[in-house]
Amino acid sequence: MATTAELWERFERANREIATWGWLQALAGWDQQTGMPPGAAGDRQEQEAALTRLLHERTTDPALGELLVALEGRDDPTELQRVAIEQATWGWRRSVAVDAGLAERLARVRSETMTAWLGARQTGDHGPWLAAMEGQLALVRERASAIAAATGHDGPLYDVLLEDYDRGVRSADLTALFDRLVPGLRGILDAVEPSPEPEAWAESADAQRALCEELSRAVGFDFSIGRLDRSEHPFTTRCGLRDVRITTRFLPDDPLGAVFATLHEAGHGMYEQGMAPSLAGAGLMHAPSTGLHESQSRFWENAIGRSPAFVRWLRGPLSRHLAAVPDAEALWTRVNRVARTPIRVEADQVTYNLHIALRFQLEQALISGELAVADLPAAWDDAMERTLGLRPADAATGVLQDIHWSFQLFGYFPSYTLGNVWAASFLLHLETELPVDELVGAGDFAPILGWFREHVHQRGATVRVDRLLKDAIGERDHVADLLTVLGRS
Ligand SMILES: [Zn+2]
């Protein structure tokens, strides 16, 4: 009979191989969005499909399942091994619950819905998209039911989907969270004087690129194991044990768009760079939850990036790279302008979570069947009016604005709000341990990053998110924390 050490070695080898293929897939995806010649799109699609097939085979390999059963039966693994085996088994059960036939139908309907979504955004006619979404939702429900049956999940189907992103989170917890957060945010929003749209601020892409490089380096993104490039939609991806890539975008008339996108992605990137590489073999070199990952980006983008001390400090880098930097007061107003807008990704800190609250309600109703797909566009517009007091001018700035539902990402949106509230809690806790304002004002971000390295980043997924938060910042009221931070600016 194999010893536990031998079984563990096989488990580590399998994890390393799966990670390696995944990183190559990420590299191909990064290239597609940053520098691939348009003519290579067909090649890339084939490469992508081949890697997806291979990864599916490896992650659902029956031999891996047997190995996990054998490891689960041992009584001598270390604590870290025990955590790794439990998590891998949990993930394994969810993966194999979806048989190959269903997986293929899901992939096909996703591709159809994505095509219909892109078409609807161009033509403004959402009819074909709604038809595709019907099929998409039916299969998403089928997948959730299969996972629920295989894993004994007895909550609403939507809760099964939430766990694709944040294990342990339940819709009832999120409802309770939004029930307190939404009135608080509306109170802040109602008290804000409407301010005029800021004037265009034209800066060259080259100047913005140099600025973003300086900013990401200043906060602590490590270029010896990372890169910063340009893409249409900013993102962060890991392409190896020591290879983390972030991207940003340059708007011709608003360099602050690039500044905050860069801070956001640098936050994600520094989290990835701070994870202990020794965890890769155990399959634990990742965040325990999407919401926690998002807390790291929102922390640098909002909690630090929109604070008075940072905005004061920011004028230095801006002046070094840009042609026309506003005075301190005008810059502050631009950075912290609050306005009711129909688009989530353009929303400010106060209205952002109202956009999420709306999506949380609608996607729950779609999954439960309470809301028919045909009624979604009208339900969207009504919810927007109730929540933000405005009606979108068209579907492109309304129900069609996000890629998530077309890409089968149901249950993802709440992670953004979890990230926002946790980022605020991190800030308020850090202020009790470090002179945050002083450090930020001096551009000395290393002690702040160092704290995250120790309490969050290097732990990877060795603990669940609730435990990690408790260890790092104790028991806190996260909703109250976000409202406190927002009330200060
Ligand atoms: Zn993010």
Image (cartoon, rainbow, N blue to C red):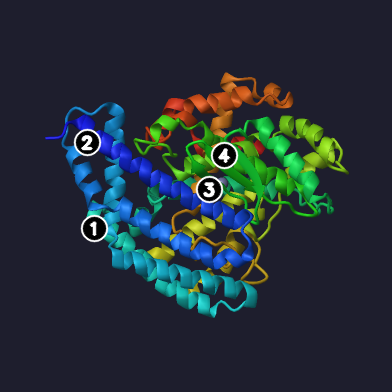
> Which structural element holds mark 2?
helix
Q: CA distance from mark 1 to mark 4?
A: 36 Å
Q: Which residue is mark 2?
A: 7
Can you tell which mark lies on residue 382?
none
Q: CA distance from mark 4 to mark 3?
A: 16 Å
Q: Nearer the viewer, residue 50 or 260?
A: 50
Residue 167 seen in the figure: no
Looking at the image, residue 192 lies above or below residue 440: below
Relative to residue 58, is residue 311 drawn left or right? right
Q: Amino acid at mark 4?
A: Gly
Q: CA distance from mark 2 to mark 4?
A: 33 Å
Q: How many marks?
A: 4
Looking at the image, residue 312 lies above or below residue 403: above
First in sequence: mark 2 vs mark 4: 2
Q: Which residue is mark 3?
A: 416
Can you tell which mark lies on residue 149?
1
Q: Residues within 10 Å of mark 1 (few under 14, many from 20)?
A: few
> Which structural element holds mark 3?
helix
Does the residue tagged 3 have its C-beta within 8 Å of any atom of ligand 1? yes
Residue 382 falls in image quadrant: bottom right
